[in-house]
Image: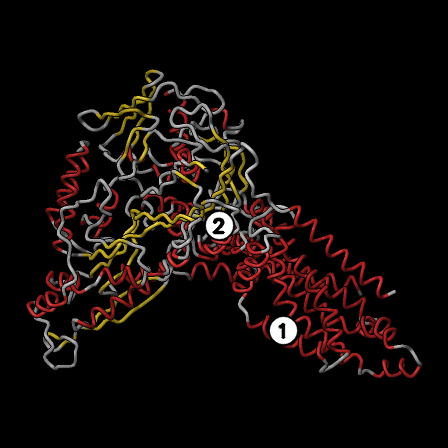
Amino acid sequence: MIRRIILNRLFQMIQVMVGISLITFTVISLSPGDPAEITLRATLGTESPPKEAVAILHEEMGLDDPWYVSYLKWISRVVHGDLGYSYQTKRSTLEEIRHALPTTFYLASFSMLFSAIIAIPLGIAAALRQNGPVDHLCRLTSIVCLSSPEYFIAIVFMLIGGVYLGIFPVAGTGGIEYFILPSLTLSVGLIAITMRIMRTSMIETLEQDYIRTARAKGLSRRKIIQRHALKNALLPVIIYMGTQFGWIFGGAVTIETIFALPGLGRLLVNSVSSMDIMVMQGCMLTFAVIIVFINLFVDLAQLYLDPSVRAQGE
Amino acid sequence: MVNMKRKEGILFILLALVVLGAGCTDKEQKGDNQTLSISGQWSPTSIDPHISGTVPQRLGYVETLVGVDYEGKIIPNLAKSWEVSSDGKKWTFKLREGVLFHDGTPFTAEIMKKSLERSFIKSASTFGKIPVTSIEAPDNLTLVISLNSTFPALPAYLSKGESAALAPGSYDASGNVTKPIGTGPFIFESYKPEEEIVVVKNPDYWGHVASVDKVVYRVIPEVLTRKMLLDSKDIQIAMILSPDVADKYTEKADYTVLEEPIARVRMITFNTEKEPFNDKKVRQAVNYAIDREAIVNSVLSGYGTTASGLFPPQFYWANKDIAPYTYDVEKAKTLLDEAGWTDSDGDGIRDKDGKPMKITLVTYSERAELPSIAEVIQQQLKKVGIETELKVLNTDAANAQRNKGDFDIYLVGRGLFFVPDPDEIMMTDYHSSGTSIDGWGAYRWHNDTVDQLIEQARTTSDEAARKKLYDEVQAIVVEEAPVAYLNYYVNIDVTTSNIKGYRLHPTEYSFDLQNVSIS
C-alpha cells in the first residue's frame, strides 16, 4: 500500500518536473527581449550594455539554438546533476538554492507551527459552540485577515513588533528571532482559512453516526473529541496545511523581500527579472520536487489518520 | 488540573518573550567602539570585487587608479597623475607612493598590472571595449597601458570598481577571491551574500583615516523596511528612500534628509522619421508646452530638478550656458500654427491636410514614476491641441516598439554615466551610428555637425578641448530638439541627526564613509 503510494508520487514527480521545465523554457523563449541583454543589464546596472558583450553572452547562452535543442542540452546536463550556474553571481545553481532553501524552510515551518497552535484550537472551540461568541470572533477575524494584503500585514507587524515595542528585529537574518515577525505575517492568511476548515470539519465529524453511538455509550464530550472526532476532523486540515507548506516555498516572495530574508521565493523572482535562466529552472525544479514530496507526506498522513483509505487499499 | 496547566502556560509564554527580548540586537554604542550601520538595496553578486565592484568601492575597502569628484570629473586616486602619448595609444600612469594593502603588502605597479589584467578578464563585458594590447610595469610606480587605437575614456573606465587594486593574498590557489584585500580606508571583514557586508577601519590608510571603527552594510531591498530600520534606530543611514517616505523626516529634529541629483535623466525621444515630429518646429513646440516644474512638483513630490540639458548642472560636463525651453503655452501654439497644424474644424485637436494631430506616447512601468509623468504630459499636450494615446508596457516590449518606429514620443529614464565620460552616451544616443540602430536615445536622427564633433572628441585626449566639443553638441541637440529633457533623478538618503560628514555622490561612486562621524 505504502509502496504503491510512494511509487505513484515518484512517477508523478518526474512528470511534474518535465512539465514545469518545458513550460518555463517556452515562457522564456516567448518573452520579449534578448535574455543575454537582460542578464547584462542586471549585471552591469545599465539599460544599454555594450553590444559586443551582449553578442558574446548571447552565444554563450546558446540563444540561437532552436528551443528543443536548448531544452535537450539542458536535460542532458540535469540528469548528470549539473544545474548550471548563475549568470549574475557566477556561483553554481545548486549552491544558490542550497543557500536559499534553509531560510525558506524555517519560514515555512514557523508559519505552520504558529498556524497550527492558533488555528486548530480556535477552530475546535468555534465548532463546539456554534454561533457563540468565539465562533463570531473567529469569523470576523478570518474575514479581516483574508482581506488584508500581505504587504500591509507585514508593515503592521514590523511597526508594532519591531519599531514600537522593539522586541523583534525589524528585518534581516540571524537567529530564530528574525523569523518571528515574517512567520507571523505569513501565518495570518493561513490561520484564517485553517480555522474555518477546522471548524467545518469538526462540525461535520461530530454529526457522524459513530459519534452518536459513542454518545449513546455514555462517553463524555471531551473523550469523544479526543478519541474519535479529532483524528478524523483533522484530515482536511492537514491536507490543506500540507498544500500551503509547499506553496510557501515559492510564494513567500513578498514576505522575503520586505523582511530581507534571502529565501527561495526571492531567488526565483530575482532570477526571473534578470533572466538568470539556469537559476530560474533550478528553482522551478526544486519547487516541483518539494510540492510532490509534501503531497506524498500528506498521502501517508491520510493513510494513518483515515481508516477508510487504509481499507480501500486492502 | 486545568488551572495549573493554564498558569504554567502563561508563565512559559512570558519567559519565552523575555528570552527573545534578551536575544535581540543591542542598539547602544558600546563604549569607545563606534559602529556605523547603513542600509541600501544593492548586494554585490560576488565576494570578488573584479566581478562585482560597485559596492566594495562605495564601502571603501577597494580603490581604483582613478577617482571621481563631486562634479562627476575624474581625479587622481591610486594613480597620482597620468598622460597620454601624442598618438593617443600609450597611457602612462604614475602611481601614488607609500600605499600599503591591508595585509601590509606594498602597492606597486607590478601588482596593479596583474590585478588589472585579472579585472579585464573577469569583467570582460565592462572592459571589453578598451582596445588594450599590453600592460607594463617599467618600475615600481609606473604603469603603462598600450592600446591599438585612441580611447580617451580610458581613465574614466579605470574608475570603475571592477578595476580596483587587489593584493595577491586575496586569491586562493585556483585564483578565486577568498578575502578581498584592497587599499581603501576600510578593511573587509565579512560578506554574507544578499545579507550584509562588514568592514572595519584601516588605521594605516594613506588618505583621511576613518573616525568610525566599523561599518555594517545591510542589504534590504524594500524601501519601507529600510525606513523601519531607521525608525527603530537599527541603522543610522537609510539609502535611496522614495520621496513620500523621505518627506516625513523633514520635520523631525532627530533625522536629516539629504538629496542629490544624479546622472540619470528623464526625457522624451521624438520619432523624427514621420509626422508630426519630423518637423523641428513641432518638436520645439512640445518642448515649450511641457511644464517641467509641474511634473517635478506633482509626480515627484518636489524631489527632482528640472532639466534643460543632458547633464545635471553641477556636473563638470554640463553645458550650463544653454538657454532652457521655458514653459510657454502661447509660444508652443504659435510654433504649431507656423508648422501648419491648426484646429480647422474646431474640435480642440489640431489638424493638417485633414489629418488630426493624434500621437502615441510609449513608456514602461519599471521605473514607477514614468507612467504618471506620461499622464501629465498627455494633459499638457491636450492644452495645445495635441491628442496623445498612452501605451505603458514592460521595458523590453516598450523598447521593441521604439526600435520598430511604432511610436511618436518615447518616455525613458536614461542613465548617462556608465563611466564618468560623455563618449558612451554621446555615441549611443546622438551620433548617427547610434541613432540609426536599436537603442534608447535620439531616434533615427542625423546631424553632420554633431557627428563630427563627437568623432573629434574621441580622438582628443585633452579634457578641456573635449569639453568644448561636447558643450557644442549639447547646444545643438537642445536647439534641434530630437529629444526633450524633463528632469533628473535624485537620490534621497535619510540619516539620524547624530551622523556628521555624510555626503551623497552624484555618480554614486563612493559613500566616502571615512568622512562620517557619529557624535
Q: Secondary structure at mark 2?
A: helix
Q: Nearer the viewer, residue A194 or B516?
A: B516
Quarter occupied by residue B132: top left
Q: At x 32% / y 33%, what residue is drawn?
A: B67
The residue that disc 1 covers is A142
Relative to residue A189, is residue A263 depicted above or below? above
Residue A276 position, x and y percent, is 47, 51
How does the figure colour the protein chain or chains?
Answer: secondary structure
Tell me the crowding category of disc 1: few under 14, some 14 to 19, or many 20 or more residues within 10 angstroms, Cα based. many
Quarter occupied by residue A157: bottom right
Q: At x 48% / y 28%, what residue is drawn?
A: B181
Q: Is residue B58 left or right of residue B147?
A: right
The residue that disc 2 covers is B230
In the image, what residue type sits under mark 1?
Ser
Q: Are marks 2 and 1 on the same chain?
A: no
Which image quadrant: the N terminus of chain A? bottom right
Tell me the crowding category of disc 2: few under 14, some 14 to 19, or many 20 or more residues within 10 angstroms, Cα based. many
Residue reaching furthest top? B139
Residue B288 position, x and y percent, is 15, 62
Q: Secondary structure at mark 1?
A: helix
Q: Is residue B487 left or right of residue B2?
A: left
